[in-house]
Image (tube, rainbow, N blue to C red):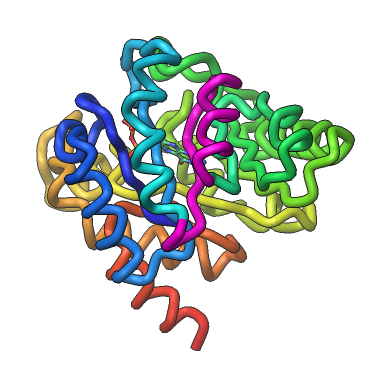
Amino acid sequence: MGVLNVTPDSFSDGGRYLDHDAAVARGLELVAEGADVVDVGGESTRPGAEPVSAAEEKRRVLQVVEALAPHVRVSVDTTKVEVADAAIDAGATMLNDVTASLYEVAGARGVGFVAMHMQGDPRTMQIEPTYDDVVAEVRDFLVDRAAAAAAAGVKEVWIDPGIGFGKTKDHNLSLLRHLDVLVATGLPVLVGTSRKRFLGELLAASDGAPAGSVVPVDDRLEGSVASAVWAMVRGAGMVRVHDVRAAVQAAKVVAG
Ligand code: HH2
């Protein structure tokens, strides 16, 4: 799954594809690099991000979805019913919902659904994430939402631990180490680690840098690929990435 953010403020590619032509060109590039799905988003969910209106989100994504849909499977990364419905009208066949709540829409419209786990909301989620048992809590939440989605008639439900969404570095690492617990649910698992902050923290730590330092977003490619490989080896069926070419090559090697 290739990431295409049509936003001014996404954490790694914000502002790059806000123009529709640039976004479509980038989407086609992701297809040429081997993406099976292009995930189009019009609202950043990075920590601290401010919400945008449904009208603005639709203005950002709909033309892009429509232009890409003849070429590749398109998913829409949204938390709003109105945007989801309009994107499906424009050709999206998968709903990627970081709040795991739009399954009624997916069921009614006959599209795939990604249920992702998040603690809190993007504005506040990284302030003090707390769990008794992060792996069990995330699994129980996702199994519950997947059951609700199936009851709403959704035929294709993916579960996603929501790396970085209300989680510390150690929470993220626990979820990755114990990905088998999610895989054991029998539901297909999607994992998104690409360019995320915990990689920046890990990479800085291994350079012997002072506590609290973070490697910048543009220096996280190798870490992103390594974590995608880890997820695939542990049984993830799909990885959500910005650098599709590198991930496709890694996937081929993992598949043997
Ligand atoms: N991560 C981001 C956004 N959407 N969806 C799923 N299912 N899983 C993820 O891990 C995930 C997601 C955050 O990354 P990005 O889209 O690059 O940034 P932003 O939210 O700032 O647009």
In percent of width and height, residue 162 lies at 52, 37
Residue at the bottom extreme of this rendering: 256
The answer to if 81 sits in the magenta stretch is: yes
* Above or below 160: residue 122: above
In which quadrant is the N terminus drawn? bottom left
The magenta segment is 70-91
Viewer-closest of 22 and 150? 22
Viewer-closest of 82 and 177? 82
| Quadrant hosting residue 135 | top right
Q: Which residue is painted at 16% across and 32% down in the image?
A: 15
Side (left or right) of 71 relative to 216: right
Side (left or right) of 85 relative to 242: right
In percent of width and height, residue 197 lies at 29, 37
* Above or below 123: residue 88: below
Q: Which residue is painted at 23% across and 53% down in the image?
A: 26
Q: Which residue is painted at 61% across and 65% down in the image?
A: 235
In percent of width and height, residue 119 lies at 55, 21
Q: Which residue is painted at 79% across and 50% down in the image?
A: 155
Q: Quadrant of ligand 1?
A: top left
| Quadrant hosting residue 122 | top left
Side (left or right) of 13 relative to 156: left
* Above or below 221: residue 50: above
Viewer-closest of 145 and 84? 84
Residue at the right extreme of this rendering: 151
